[in-house]
Amino acid sequence: MNTRTLWLAGLACALSLGLAACEKKGPLEQAGEEVDEAVNTLKNGGKETTADKLDDAGDKVRDAAEEAKDAVTK
């Protein structure tokens, strides 16, 4: 196995654990994450990194799960 595959597998596991917690991020945590992503994008020559794309996808899934939960409990 190459290192990229192992790295992506590890990242997928970390995202899965994060999604399992399904804890909503506070505004400061979200702002800090966006700053980190902007710095990573600048370091990567203006292209968004794969890790940041996966993190964004995880955030969308977490938000959708939270909205679905709220819709069911109403």
Image (cartoon, grey):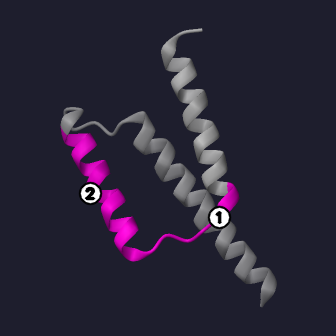
Which of the marked residues, 2 or 1, is nearer the chain's N terminus? Answer: 1
Q: Confirm whether the magenta stretch covers residue 39.
A: yes
Q: Confirm whether the magenta stretch covers residue 59.
A: no
Q: Residue at x 68, y 66 (%)?
A: 65
| Residue 22 - label | 1
Q: Residue at x 28, y 36 (%)?
A: 47
Is residue 43 placed above or below 68 in the rendered structure? above
Report the front residue among 67 and 23: 23
Is residue 74 placed above or below 27 in the rendered structure? below
Magenta residues, start to end: 20-42
Residue 61, image x and y in percent? 62, 58
Residue 3, image x and y in percent? 50, 15
The residue carrying mark 2 is 35
- Classed neighbour count for the residue bearing mark 1: other residues with Cα under 10 Å, few (<14), some (14–19), many (≥20): some
The quarter of the picture where the N terminus appears is: top right
Magenta stretch secondary structure, dominant:
helix
Is residue 12 placed above or below 36 in the rendered structure? above
Residue 27, image x and y in percent? 39, 75
Image quadrant of residue 70? bottom right
Q: Residue at x 48, y 48 (%)?
A: 55
Q: Is residue 51 left or right of residue 28?
A: right
Q: Is residue 58 left or right of residue 68?
A: left
Kindly identify the amino acid type of the residue bearing the numbered disc 1: Cys
Q: Is residue 42 left or right of residue 7?
A: left
Give the residue at the far bottom of this rendering: 74
